[in-house]
């Protein structure tokens, strides 16, 4: 088999004098054993995770059973730990680093429990399960994600204190001094067999959207400038400090686009722009977008040097491996080659070290999510909610409507009608007939969204609904309707389709997007474009999430910091009995030329 350059250089040290060179006959010097010494080479691997979102074990606390999806993925740090152990065994522990790209302490009932129910901030309180697991696995650094700020800065600071590794955020600055509020970078030395250490710098960058999405927690305390400008500031400094390799851990998608319209002061998904615009970067661990990118190469627009990007799938479903090959040239280590891949966590068993470490915490949270909070007179499910007005979505809307009405009572806007938006976040959520537990109610709202009230006009609401209706695939009258192919047009996710309660309307899916809302009425009369309404809306949507028209710029009448799912739990507890007959109604339906689809 022909030898490539690297194989030849490594093999020549073993074969020694008399070995035939790839180019032909040996030189006279080589024939006497005095040939040029092979170049010093060293290889190492950087492993990466992102968007763990509170997943330690392969468990779904919203269903209280082992996690599973259509692709039979697995989740959690216990699975990641097994993969990490395998990589370290193969590469050598001292030839690896392990980093993360953010969104660590929010997303499951496990992470919620230790932020709100038995908070890590209480005196003598527990150590966060994510800190325990990541410390035990041996993380070297982690970037901040936007969801790190959901529970407030005190919880984040306590988590930071409990971690044995730094939380990095070069573009998370103190609002007054404009100095980094967290370490911008971490430096790591890898010992080589050649007596020449490799110096690896990890630069952490987070998402500027934090300033909007968690305004209540960070306003006046921290600011979040763009990723590109902060990378351009820090990468040269790291190189001047002697970094042989620079890796960016960025809680920012790769695409350079945003689902938040023009609401963000900086591009939300900027990892690709960082690679293209900032020289001196070797690789970027990408986060935030919840997509899987095994390897993606972007050439710097001026130098032409390729930067390797990789994003492992969320929740610990994948582990990224960046494999670096270095050569010693002119008195320093130079990156010769970088390659990336992802490993699937469903190929291994959970590490018993991690499952045993967190067995008590797991039991506590399982008991918590199974606490009974009320009863329901009928079963409700989201199975058909993406294409039918279902009582389970009406339940979310009635809770939000009543909450906003109570908040505005006695004020200047108390007389205005309150409408509400809700999405189908999961097609498997259900409220059973009989006893309702915390996990049942929480399963309707797996995100940490909070509730706001925004002032909207009839004309704005019409455009809002038209925008929402682009979710449906154009389906001519008379054509067969397949629900498996009816939704997610233009890759619109389920959570970016809103049903609005308090109005009556039809969505004609035989018409092109933008021309689908018909029969739009309020209290039996055609909607007055000039009429004013209060829209109960989650903070994601109100902040521009999904780029829905008008709502982000609408006047905010009220907001609170309690998660909507907790508001639902409290509402069920207060009512005791949930009766869909008291609130469920068919306010919208899909049609084609006036004929209902279902």
Image: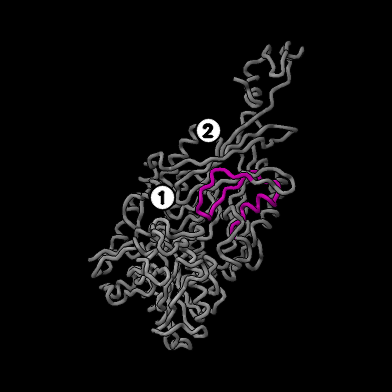
Coloring applied to the structure: one colour
Secondary structure found at label 2: helix
The residue wearing badge 1 is 56
Residue at the image position 64 percent from the left and 57 percent from the top: 227
Residue 108: % across, % down = 40, 57
Residue 452: % across, % down = 47, 75
Residue 441, located in which quarter of the rendered image? bottom left
Is there any visible trace of residue 187 in the rendered image?
A: no
Tell me whether the residue at label 2 lies in contact with that at label 1, contact meaning CB atoms closer than 8 angstroms.
no
Q: In which quarter of the image is the C terminus?
A: bottom left
Task: Report whether 51 appears left or right of 10.
Answer: left
The residue wearing badge 2 is 91
Residue 77: % across, % down = 43, 47
Residue 286 on the magenta span:
yes
Residue 22: % across, % down = 69, 19
Earlier-in-chain disc, 2 versus 1:
1
Is there any visible trace of residue 456 in the rendered image?
A: yes
Label 2 Cα neighbours within 10 Å, binned few <14 / some 14-19 / many ≥20: some
Looking at the rendering, the stretch of residues picked out in magenta corresponds to 268-297
Residue at the image position 61 percent from the left and 49 percent from the top: 248
């Amino acid at each position: 088999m022909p030898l490539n350059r690297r194989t030849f250089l490594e093999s020549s040290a073993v074969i020694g004098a008399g070995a035939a060179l790839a180019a032909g006959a040996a030189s006279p010097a080589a024939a006497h054993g005095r040939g040029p010494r092979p170049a010093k080479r060293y290889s190492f691997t950087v492993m990466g995770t992102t968007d763990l979102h509170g997943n330690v074990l392969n468990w779904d606390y919203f269903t209280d059973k082992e996690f599973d999806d259509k692709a039979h993925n697995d989740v959690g740090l216990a699975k990641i730990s097994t993969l990490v152990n395998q990589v370290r065994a193969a590469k050598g522990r001292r030839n690896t680093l392990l980093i993360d790209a953010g969104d660590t302490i929010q997303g499951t009932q496990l992470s919620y429990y230790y932020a709100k129910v038995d908070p890590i901030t209480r005196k003598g309180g527990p150590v966060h399960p994510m800190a325990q697991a990541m410390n035990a696995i041996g993380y070297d650094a982690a970037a901040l994600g936007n969801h790190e700020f959901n529970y407030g800065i005190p919880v984040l600071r306590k988590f930071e204190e409990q971690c044995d590794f730094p939380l990095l955020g070069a573009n998370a600055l103190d609002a007054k001094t404009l100095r980094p509020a967290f370490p911008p970078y971490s430096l790591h030395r890898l010992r080589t067999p050649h007596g020449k250490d490799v110096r690896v710098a990890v630069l952490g960058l987070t998402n500027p959207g934090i300033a909007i999405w968690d305004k209540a927690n960070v306003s006046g305390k921290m600011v979040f400038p763009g990723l590109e400008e902060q990378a351009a500031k820090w990468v040269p400094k790291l190189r001047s400090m002697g970094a042989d390799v620079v890796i960016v851990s960025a809680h920012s998608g790769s695409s350079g686009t945003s689902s938040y319209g023009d609401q963000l002061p900086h591009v939300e998904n900027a990892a690709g722009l960082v690679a293209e615009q900032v020289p001196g970067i070797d690789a970027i661990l990408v986060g935030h977008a919840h997509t899987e990118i095994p390897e993606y190469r972007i050439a710097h627009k001026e130098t032409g040097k390729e930067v390797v990007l990789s994003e492992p799938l969320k929740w610990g479903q994948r582990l990224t491996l960046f494999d670096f090959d270095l050569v010693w040239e002119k008195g320093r280590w130079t990156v010769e080659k970088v390659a990336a891949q992802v490993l699937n966590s469903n190929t291994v068993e959970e590490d018993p070290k991690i499952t045993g470490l967190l067995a008590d915490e797991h039991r506590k949270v399982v008991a918590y999510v199974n606490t009974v909070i009320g009863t329901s007179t009928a079963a409700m499910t989201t199975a058909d909610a993406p294409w039918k007005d279902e009582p389970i979505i009406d339940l979310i809307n009635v809770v939000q409507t009543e909450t906003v009405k109570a908040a505005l009572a006695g004020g200047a806007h108390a007389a205005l009608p309150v409408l509400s938006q809700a999405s189908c976040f999961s097609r498997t959520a259900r409220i059973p007939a009989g006893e309702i537990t915390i996990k049942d109610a929480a399963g309707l709202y797996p995100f940490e969204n909070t509730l706001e009230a925004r002032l909207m006009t009839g004309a704005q609401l019409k455009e809002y609904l038209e925008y929402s209706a682009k979710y449906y695939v154009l389906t001519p009258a008379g054509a067969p309707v397949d629900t498996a192919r009816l939704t997610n047009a233009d890759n619109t996710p389920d959570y970016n389709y809103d049903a609005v309660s308090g109005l009556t309307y039809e969505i004609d899916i035989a018409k092109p997007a933008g021309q689908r809302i018909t029969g739009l009425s309020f209290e039996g009369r055609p909607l007055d474009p000039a009429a004013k309404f209060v829209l109960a809306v989650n903070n994601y949507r109100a902040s521009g999430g999904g780029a829905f028209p008008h709502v982000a710029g609408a006047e905010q009448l009220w907001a609170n910091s309690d998660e909507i799912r907790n508001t639902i739990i409290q509402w069920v507890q207060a009512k005791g009995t949930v009766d869909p007959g008291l609130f469920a109604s068919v306010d919208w339906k899909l049609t084609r030329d006036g004929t209902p689809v279902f």
